């Protein structure tokens, strides 16, 4: 049984969900890192694992209270509420900040990942040869992923369903960014920008009792794409949670070693000093999204110039990111002592 949660606990859980949702949308950043650092990663995985045959049997038999208690529904509900709020609010703010202040945003995330590496590794037995090997494998995996070239956009609904399964990895595997994987397979803008904006516009129109969107073939296509992506995400979330619960139970140290490696390897993806590689058509023209913003397909990285004031501001924000993680860790230890 889970301990009763106070209003403050519930509020912080929603805020953690908002943090996960925002992190999941940023290519290179894993929402699983937020869960890991904030101290609810294992509860998150084991709660998802409870969505199984027994849970559906309780639901079909009308034992709703037992069903909600069995799957830890209050915890999952508050967390997913935060993620939904994030996708329609914080993530839009984040999109704006990345567009106008990308160096400082990436610097903050870079600092958060450095802090995360410390948080995960500080109590870990690094001297074990087997653990060191799995850390190295994780680092190599993270670096290889960061160097891959992105593919072309594909809106086939079966492929979009598969993207949902792949994209949700960022929520369950700290250090492996689901949004960056979506960028690599060419569907980041389609699934996390265009389709989400289409749903947002639809909600606004429904609120105004405007149903004209049903005649908008492009809007309907986007909603179908988002539905398939969501379904794939749910399937991936539940199936991956069962796998992760098993490996956490039987191979805990090796799993943590891989996580440390993935987080370390992902530093290259969120390196603050980089230039956008924009998507072009066959005539060399830059392709724009629905908001008339250029579509970013990848980044080219460079070393910063210490003579630039922006470099020192970026370093400042790296320390801000580290401080955020340290603060979360302090909050987690304080909660454990209560």
Image (cartoon, rainbow, N blue to C red):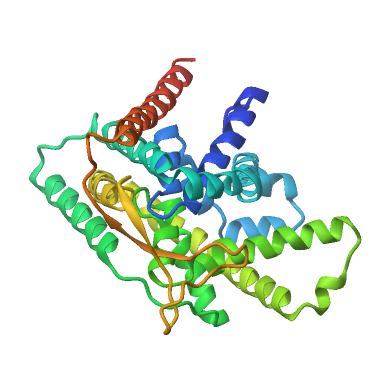
Camera-nearest residue between 273 and 216: 273
Look at the picture and state if 197 lies above or below 94.
below
Q: Residue furthest right?
A: 209
Q: What percent of the width, then of the height, locates residue 312?
A: 30, 30
Residue 218 in view here: yes
Mark yes or no: residue 1 visible.
no
Residue that appears at 60% across and 39% down? 75
Q: Residue at x 57, y 67 (%)?
A: 289
Residue 203: x and y, percent?
78, 58
Q: Residue at x 35, y 29 (%)?
A: 322
In the picture, the quarter occupied by the N terminus is top right
- Taking the image as shown, residue 241 lies to the left or right of residue 213, namely left
Q: Position of residue 180 (x, y in %)?
A: 40, 60
Residue at 36% of width from left, 71% of height from top?
Answer: 150
Q: 37 or 218: nearer the eye?
A: 218
Q: Quadrant of residue 90?
A: top right
Q: Residue furthest front?
A: 307
């Amino acid at each position: 049984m889970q301990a009763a949660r106070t209003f403050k606990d519930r509020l912080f859980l929603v805020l953690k969900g908002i943090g996960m949702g925002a992190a999941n949308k940023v290519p290179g950043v894993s929402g699983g890192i937020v869960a890991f650092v904030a101290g609810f990663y294992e509860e998150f995985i084991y709660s998802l694992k409870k969505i199984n045959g027994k849970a559906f049997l309780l639901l079909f038999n009308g034992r709703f209270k037992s069903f909600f208690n069995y799957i830890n529904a209050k915890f999952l509900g508050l967390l997913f509420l935060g993620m939904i709020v994030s996708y329609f609010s914080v993530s839009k703010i984040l999109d704006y900040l990345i567009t106008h202040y990308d160096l400082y945003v990436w610097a903050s995330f870079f600092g958060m990942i450095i802090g995360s590496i410390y948080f995960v590794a500080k109590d870990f037995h690094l001297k074990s040869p087997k653990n060191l090997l799995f850390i190295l494998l994780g680092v190599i995996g993270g670096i290889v992923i960061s160097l891959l070239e992105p593919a072309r956009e594909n809106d086939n609904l079966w492929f979009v369903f598969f993207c949902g399964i792949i994209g949700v990895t960022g929520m369950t595997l700290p250090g492996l960014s689901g949004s960056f994987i979506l960028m690599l397979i060419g569907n980041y803008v389609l699934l996390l920008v265009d389709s989400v904006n289409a749903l947002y516009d639809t909600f606004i129109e429904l609120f105004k009792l405007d149903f004209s969107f049903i005649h908008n073939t492009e809007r309907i296509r986007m909603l179908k794409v988002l539905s398939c992506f969501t379904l794939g995400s749910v399937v991936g979330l539940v199936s991956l949670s069962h796998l992760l619960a098993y490996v956490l139970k039987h191979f805990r140290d090796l799993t943590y070693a891989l996580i440390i490696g993935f987080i370390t390897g992902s530093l290259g993806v969120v390196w603050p000093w980089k230039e956008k590689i924009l998507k072009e058509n066959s005539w060399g023209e830059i392709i724009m999204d629905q908001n008339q913003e250029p579509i970013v397909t990848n980044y080219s990285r460079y070393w910063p110039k210490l003579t630039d004031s922006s470099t020192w501001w970026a370093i400042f924000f790296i320390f801000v990111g580290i401080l955020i993680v340290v603060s979360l860790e302090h909050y987690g230890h304080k909660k454990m002592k209560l």
